[in-house]
Amino acid sequence: MGSDMMNKELFGVFGGADAFADVCEAESFDRVCSTESLTVGIRDPDLGAPHRSGAYEDDAGCCVVWGEVYTSDGVDRPARWLLERYRESGANALSALNGSYLVAVTDGVEAAVYTDPIRSWECFYTDVAGPRAFGTDAARVCRVGSELSLDPDSLLELAHLSVVLDERTLFEEVSRTPFDGVLRADATEELDRFVYHPREFDYAGELAARMRRALSRRADLRGTKGLLLGAGYDSRTLLAAIPDIECCYTVGTEDSSEIRVARKLARQYGATHRTLGVDGSYFATDIDTVRYTNGIGESIHIHQRGVERIADADVMYHGWAIDSLLKEFFVQKKRVGAFGKSVKLSPLAEEPDAIDFLTDRKLGIMPESPALLAEYVDEPQRHLEERLERELDRCRARCTREHDLPSVFGIKNLPSKSFRTHLADQFTESFVCADSELIDWHLSTPPEYRSTETFLAAIQRLDPHVLRYRPPDRPRTSSILNQIEGFCRRNLPLPFPAFDSPWPDRRSLYREYDLDRTLLPDAPELHSCSVRLKLRIHDVETWLTALAGEGAITPEEVVRPPASRRFVLRGETASH
């Protein structure tokens, strides 16, 4: 793939150096560790830095840690430390790790690759060319084989649900290490680190204390520090708690309320501010952006595309997934009808319905999807819901209450993961929500207390002035009053404009730059579809074209997948 090679990558095989050389060039990595049962290459500009990727090998084994890792013993370069403990206690040694990581390890007897408890990094694998190969870049793993078969069910999910569910990819021969799981030479296994165990405690006070420690752990990264800052609650928490953030970056237009509030927040905490402007290139996604979807999600979530060209920063912080892990994004609340709309209340839904909840704004199901699928499957709406039901059934063993089911589903299948994958490839990045203390808080806190109210109480203990400038679309302390005011501004002839969206207006941008002509010139029958669905179609086309060449798939086949299709991959097998 040439220039498509990511800046940071882990790739390996369950075999020796010769098996690795058969599918990959060792020269493309900063470090290669090899034993008879496991060979792993790693490329990372932060390799060897404290709490970042590292590798160790001796005569009998090796251990590669990829990502961001803190240990209970305070060891700042844990690869050797972990291998020694792995020899003593096996997989139990991983309980001492804290962070966002993959671990590839062999003690001389057995080789395995472990995810962190929330699978914050994907690890793809395939068995098409001898010993099992695995890695963080799906494109490289796909190229281990010269031909692959399209999985039409996965493509249907990606096109119409916004994400490929569970452990699958767009190809039948390529899979993903399970959520909270382990990959072995000939098997996979799910672990039990992410299981709900609710209890009573001081939810806000404990969250504040754990956030303070989690942020403190990540405050000493080397280099100039930047922050992707929105006007909402999440990213300002990092700005308030990490003292030496020098510059903040916000996506939007200079005259938007999002930019105005973000600029005030930056000034409040002594940081400079830069706007990530929005033009037609925001949607002109080529392989340089789409590769970060790994062919399992959509690139629309990479709002910060282009930040690497203007950012004067080595380290980039962000508040991604705070809404999912520390707030209520995937918690089903009670709703009541008002003015033809529904208003969300604080209490939990009395009869939770995970399917209804997930299909109502939580996933990217577009209104036209059932019509597009009508000629492809019987009862298309039911067909999509059955896919969600199967995935929810896989999540049930981790829950004690039905109210937790959407959270497991959402955290396991986050469609916005491409945001973080892109950012981590461009900067030294820190994923605060992967902190083990915060994950334990999430699993210990009943869903009625995993709320915005609890979160706001916690961050005000970190800094009582953190809410001095309120988000522009939430000017009041009451959630219900904010919802009512937002409805009135949108629908009544008031002298006040509707609240600005925190994100660019997709429809107007798409129309302004006539992107149907650029992205879907040969598919006029799809021009009436939702912008988000059209961008998803373009993502799939772009990713498959990078692998298999022009004409690999048509836009019509993306929304109505062919029953079978073999792809001959471009370039030398497994070679970048």
Image (cartoon, helix red, strand yellow):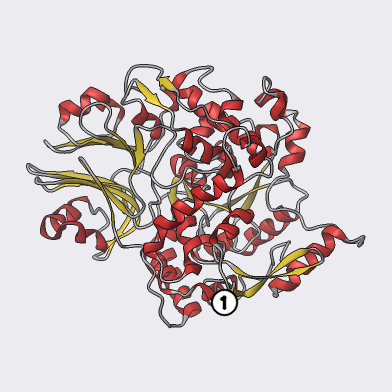
Q: Is residue 303 visible?
A: no
Which quadrant, please, contains the C terminus? top left
Q: Position of residue 392 (x, y in %)?
A: 46, 56
In the visual, does 26 lie left or right of 245? Answer: left
> Is 429 located above or below residue 466 in the figure?
above
Expressed as whole percent of the image width and height from the top left, the position of residue 396 reads 41, 62
In this view, the residue in front, 332 or 10, is 332
Give the total number of marks visible in the rendering.
Answer: 1
Q: Amino acid at mark 1?
A: Ala
Residue 253 as seen in the image, left or right of residue 559: right
Residue 535: horizontal and vertical position, in percent? 63, 35
Q: Residue at x 47, y 42 (%)?
A: 164
The residue positioned 57% from the left and 56% from the top of the image is 358
- Is residue 74 at all visible to an observer of this figure? yes
Q: Secondary structure at mark 1?
A: helix
Q: Is residue 483 above or below residue 102?
A: below
Q: Which residue is mark 1?
A: 457
Quarter of the picture containing the N terminus is: top left
Residue 312 percent coordinates (x, y): 54, 43
Determine whether, in the image, residue 492 is placed left or right of residue 160.
right
Q: Residue furthest left?
A: 59
In the foreground, 563 or 333: 563
- 100 or 134, which lies in front? 134
**Residue neighbourhood size for the residue with mark 1, other residues' Cα within 10 Å, grouped as few (<14), some (14–19), many (≥20):** some
Residue at image point 16% right, 26% down: 18
Figure quadrant of residue 485: bottom right
What residue do we see at 16% from left, 34% from top? 15
| Image-based side of 70 in relation to 320, left or right | left
Q: Nearer the viewer, residue 536 or 204?
A: 536
- Above-or-below relation of 320 to 452: above
